[in-house]
Amino acid sequence: EVQLVESGGGLVQAGGSLRLSCAASGFSIDDYVIGWFRQAPGKEREGVSCISSSDSSTYYEDPVKGRFTISSDNAKNTVYLQMNNLKPEDTRVYHCATELEPRDCPEPFVQPYWGRGTQVTVSS
């Protein structure tokens, strides 16, 4: 069974940092693209970053470039999102997702598997 479990969210002041983890099971992350997405209540989900562990290619959406870093630990089958210099507008629920089909970052997923998400709240 494919599972993605996010952790590491919390409450932080503006300018602070958090590291999110996405622990995968049921598949190997080095075979597929893993993406981080975020969503605020009543708003559409938006992409944040993605990583292709097979060739270590990464991609970042403009709002997080230079502040967020995506990485992976294939031995732990886990993808991380290091978030620095957090801003109040980063307050969202953060989800990781994958699709067990060949993809390049940041091609959109068609039928992704989603984790339940972890809340990130940045106070001003």
Image (cartoon, grey):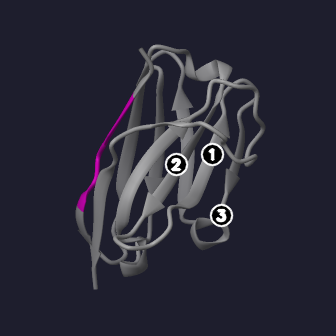
Real-space CA distance between mark 1 and mark 2, rounded to the nearest whole angstrom: 6 Å
- The secondary structure type at the circle numbered 2 is strand
Q: What residue is shown at x 52% (from left), y 48% (from top)?
A: 36
Under mark 3, the amino acid is Glu
Mark 1–mark 2 CB contact (< 8 Å): yes
Under mark 2, the amino acid is Trp
Where is residue 25 shown, x and y percent of the image? Answer: 42, 18
Image quarter in which the N terminus is found: top left
- The secondary structure type at the circle numbered 1 is strand
Q: 92 and 77: which one is in front?
A: 92
Image quarter in which the C terminus is found: bottom left
* Side (left or right) of 20 relative to 108: left
Up-down relation of residue 55 to residue 7 (above or below): above
Look at mark 2 in the image and give the residue it sits on: 36
Does 25 appear in magenta?
no
* Side (left or right) of 35 relative to 122: right
In this view, which residue lies farthest toward the bottom?
A: 124
User: What range is drawn magenta here?
Assistant: 4-10
- Mark 2 is surrounded, within 10 Å at the Cα level, by few (under 14), some (14 to 19) or many (20 or more) other residues, namely many
**Number of callouts in the render?**
3
Q: Main secondary structure of the magenta part?
A: strand
Look at mark 1 in the image and give the residue it sits on: 50
Q: 61 and 101: which one is in front?
A: 101
- Mark 3 is surrounded, within 10 Å at the Cα level, by few (under 14), some (14 to 19) or many (20 or more) other residues, namely few
Under mark 1, the amino acid is Cys
Rendering quarter of residue 40: bottom left
Where is residue 105 shown, x and y percent of the image? Answer: 74, 44
Real-space CA distance between mark 3 and mark 1, rounded to the nearest whole angstrom: 9 Å
Look at mark 3 in the image and give the residue it sits on: 61
- Of the numbered discs 1 and 2, the one sitting upstream in the chain is 2
- Of the numbered discs 3 and 1, the one sitting upstream in the chain is 1
Q: What residue is shown at x 45% (from left), y 20% (from top)?
A: 2
